[in-house]
Amino acid sequence: MNSISTNFKFFVESDINPFIIFNDNGKIIYLNSASEVLLGYVSRQELYDITLSYAPKDFGFKTTKLDLQYDSFTFYAFCVAYQNEDEIALHLYHKPRIETKNTIEMNRYNITDINNLLEANISLFKLQNDNELTLFVDQDLPAFKLDQNQFSKLLRKVLDSFRSSDSIAISLKLLIGEYIIIGDKKEHLIELTVKANGRYTESDEIIKEIAELNHIVSIFKEYSVRLQIPFIR
Amino acid sequence: MTNQFFTQSVQVQKIIKGFNLTKSLLVSSILIGDAHIGKKSLIRHLFPKVVSVDGANQEKVEEYLSNYNELIITNFEKLTNIENLDFTNKRIIAIANYMGNEKIIDNLFAFIYHMPSLKERLEDVSLLTQLFIKEVQSNLVIPQKLNIDTSRLDISNNSKSLKKSIYQQVFIRSCGTKEIEEILYHFLLDNMNGNNDYKEYLTLYEKPLIEAGLAKYGSQLKLSTILGINRNTLRKKIYELNLD
């Protein structure tokens, strides 16, 4: 079967896993569309460094199982391959996400003023913590449908992970041009960002679990947590 | 009748603010704290029209949960099977004397409030003391203003022991000769059964007499004149009664 001669470029181009070919100077000479998106969040140099560090000792390929996270992209492994001295390729493999029902149980969702819900959760947080807290929200943000109980639980856990931070900044905004598909409907996204000078990470897994059950994307960084919430009206 | 709740505690005022903010939301909240710190009064004050059910009765709680979308569950710590309770799309306000299984509580409730006990909110002790004094004066029909010895207030069991210590103080301070005689009569009737009771129970009179006299007149010399007894006799009594 290896004797087949065809143009594989289209198939590589449409792969959801990023695929990049560097020349011997680290310059990108090919990248598929998934890589273009990824390069918005990680530098070319960082990917090239990984490629060189994990390259096989001789011509051929080597797959390494290693968790890599760049913003909301998580990879569980990658393959580095080269067959001459001029080109080297990196293929990153997305970590499979937990299978969640792509439908939403609308009976749990009620029209909610998110600013009110946020205020209630901040008030709960302030009962036990006296950290300085700043809030940047859009008061004109229209009410939308949320599972109020689940979302409050999620917020409590997110805020709690910042309990020892000196100052906490919370912001809420409507994301322009980004969507989530739920069922067969395209929904806008609202992004809630909580940022400080440090945070505890022990609840990240449970935060992620609650978020996924509620079709919310959670993005964890060293100093921040972002929640992308479907704006269902 | 409206349910009133009085507090000057900043912590409790923050809890009230939290509950007020979630009043219109379908969320589950729990208020945890020692017994007799005003949890039930606070919740009844905030949610006067919401149906309440006692957590000691598991079946009734389950029945109410299927019939009401808004429910107060008191004594939540007494419920034995809480994992399977379904709070979806309901406004649940639970009250518990202690947390119990932290993991389950954390999973069931979006809002978890811890109410401080009275020893952690001394500002409320003086507020409650004034309220209880008014209450006891009204109940015992005592018209005159009474001063309470604040050093003798008991908050070991929160408002329950505080109220008891105030009732005792107010009653004691309002007693006249007739009531004191009556108290002694009943006490002696219940307790007399020895051979030397005259001498033993005489201390019931002598001890407060000398204690009050020393507090009022300061010196033994002056007190012996006031009482009309010999100075040496008074000194001997003070020694016998361990008042020195």
Image (spheres, coloured by chain):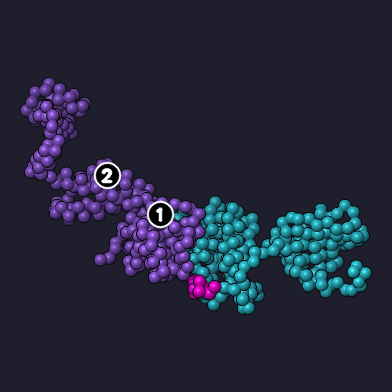
Chain colours: A cyan, B purple
User: With respect to residue B188, does B10 lie above or below?
Assistant: below
| Membership of A117 in magenta stretch | yes
Residue A175: x and y in percent read 62, 72
Q: Which mark is residue A72?
A: none
Q: Nearer the viewer, mark 1 or mark 2?
A: 1
Q: Residue furthest top?
A: B232
Tell me the amino acid under the disc marked 1.
Glu
A103, A133: nearer the viewer: A103
Residue B24: x and y in percent read 42, 70
Left of B235 or right of it: where is A221? right
Disc 1 or 2, which lies upstream in sequence? 1
Identify the residue under disc 2.
B153
Residue A206: x and y in percent read 58, 58
Q: Quadrant of the C terminus of chain B?
A: top left
Q: Which mark is residue B77?
A: 1
Left of B226 or right of it: where is A116? right
Chain designation of label 2? B
* Same chain shared by disc 1 and disc 2: yes
Rounded to the nearest whole Å, what is the CA distance between mark 1 and mark 2?
29 Å
Instruction: Give the magenta range.
Output: A105-118
